[in-house]
Image: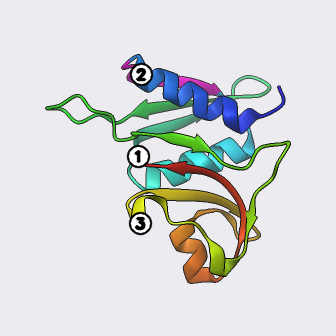
Amino acid sequence: MTDPIADYLTRLRNAIKARHRIVEIPASNIKKEITKVLFDKGYIQNYKFDDTTVQGTIKIALKYNPTTKQSAIVKLERISKPGLRKYKGAGELPRVLNGLGISILSTSKGVITDKEARVLNVGGEVLCHVY
């Protein structure tokens, strides 16, 4: 697999379109960190890391509005790709939907959102936008 983060986002996107409650994704350290950020910001309901196999899996419970059946995640967009990495400094971090969405970055302080990166005054690789 060339781009495991794009595969992760695509599995989430497909599960949301199919209205699945739980999606199972092969685990890696970066995917675990992205999952933690999505949970902390309220985009997913819950997650569980299952390390019984060699690679392990991530089980993610997706979050839906109970009345409208709309997902909490409207769009997942991959920004930095293996063929073209996108790095931004602390002063030029992107704002997603004028601050309503989040941008997930891989920085020297770990995998964090754009808002946390502005507070810490660090830049890094822009992995994806979520809103």
- Does 57 sit above or below residue 103? above
Foreground label between 1 and 3: 3
3D distance between C-alphas at marks 1 and 3: 15 Å
Q: Is residue 117 visible?
A: yes
SS type, badge 3: helix
| Residue 119: x %, y % from top left | 55, 82
Q: Amino acid at mark 3?
A: Gly
| Residue 35: x %, y % from top left | 56, 45
Residue 49 relative to residue 61: left or right: right
Q: Amino acid at mark 1?
A: Tyr
- Does 39 sit above or below residue 93? above
Query: Which of the numbered marks, if any, corresponds to residue 99?
Result: 3
Q: Is residue 50 visible?
A: no
> Does the stretch in magenta take in 72?
no
Q: What's the coloring here?
A: rainbow
Q: Quadrant of residue 82?
A: top right
Of residue 23 and residue 129, the one placed in the foreground of this image is 129
- Does 73 sit above or below residue 19? below
Residue at 34% x, 36% y is: 63
Q: Residues within 10 Å of mark 1 (few under 14, many from 20)?
A: some
Q: Amino acid at mark 2?
A: Lys
Q: Please report the bounds of the magenta region as a residue range.
A: 19-25
Residue 6 relative to residue 82: left or right: left
Residue at 60% x, 63% y is: 112
- Does 97 sit above or below residue 21? below
Q: Quadrant of the N terminus?
A: top right
Of residue 72 and residue 40, the one placed in the foreground of this image is 72
Mark closer to the chain start, 2 or 3: 2
Mark closer to the chain start, 2 or 1: 2
Q: Which residue is mark 1?
A: 43
Q: Which residue is mark 2?
A: 17
Residue at 80% x, 53% y is: 85
